[in-house]
Image (spheres, helix red, strand yellow):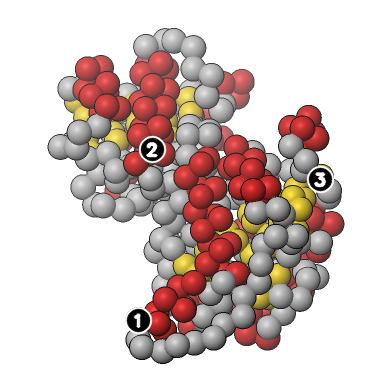
Amino acid sequence: MKILATPTSLKPDAKNPALDELKKFTSEITYNTAGRPLSEEELRPLLEDCDGYIAGLDFVTARVVESCKKLKVISRYGAGVDRVDIDAASRRGIAVCNTPGANADAVADLAFGLILSVARRIPALDRLTKEGKWTRSTGVELSGKTIGILGLGAIGKAVAKRAAGFSMRVLAFDPYMDEAYARANGIETAGFGDTVKNSDILSLHLPLNDETRHVINGEIMRGMKQGAIIINAARGGLIDEGAAFELLKSGHLGGLGLDAYEEEPPAASPLFELDNVVATPHTGAHTREATANMALMAVSNLIDVLSGKECKYVLNKARIK
């Protein structure tokens, strides 16, 4: 069987237990040599005669899927599937899998790193100190503040645990709220609007789809507390970046921590001119532990589907025609 593996961390010469398992399954493996997510035009010829596909953050459009003559499974290396046209895959009988929870601790760690970095201006102060300046900066403490978590899935839950360790009040919204988990862990639940307007820090952990694109728009941000901080370690399209820039400049927003952007890699964004914006290159899941977990799950999902075994992480099983 022929497999395409595009995650940039899956390199053919790397010592990787997941790749070892994949190589036991098949010797026909094609890798991503571009070092970045692949476009529609790049994917189509690569997938044309593949049986399986371990997908990074590539753009798996309907045109890509429709050109796949033999493909049986798209196994996402990660939890998000917003770049995969699941409807098109379902029509072609292609299973779409993901790896929920495999990178939850890694992303939650980075989200909290962004919270601390914005609240105490750590990157800006680091730069100034190294330049020989002895700057006095007044930050904000986390203890006693309210963190609003939009999306209480595996990552949102991991952020909530970290917030509890900082003596924060945790408020959460999720359209499919795990009420039992929230009660057991001291998490207050609320509607979307109440969560946003009552938060000192708002951390986004929602998927990106038609309903959530620009869910944090200018009107929503203007309704937030004066000086509130927004953290996005999920998907870039959740925030209207232009509106955020204006509200950061006016002082209404206290800061912004970004690991995801509307355009990736981002162009010369005006947000990068601001000291109260901390930016990282969509690196939340990039820890040794998380990449190993995601790779093992993605390979296991792919092998299960191609071997005719039950795979509990197939997202579109009921929709395949």
Check the image and report above or below for 211 versus 115. above
Identity, as a three-letter code, of the amino acid under mark 3: Glu
Q: Is residue 234 left or right of residue 59?
A: right
Instruction: Name the quadrant of the C terminus.
Output: top right
Identity, as a three-letter code, of the amino acid under mark 2: Glu
At label 3, counting other C-alpha atoms closer than 10 Å, the crowd grade (few under 14, some 14-19, many 20 or more) is some
Rendered location of residue 6, percent (x, y): 31, 41
Disc on res. 188: 3
Q: Are marks 2 and 1 in contact (CB under 8 Å)?
A: no
Residue 44 found in image quarter: top left
Rendered location of residue 285, percent (x, y): 44, 46
- State the CA–CA distance, disc 2 to disc 3: 30 Å
Disc on res. 130: 1
Kind of element beneath mark 2: helix
Q: Which residue is mark 2?
A: 289
Which mark is nearer the camera, 2 or 1? 1
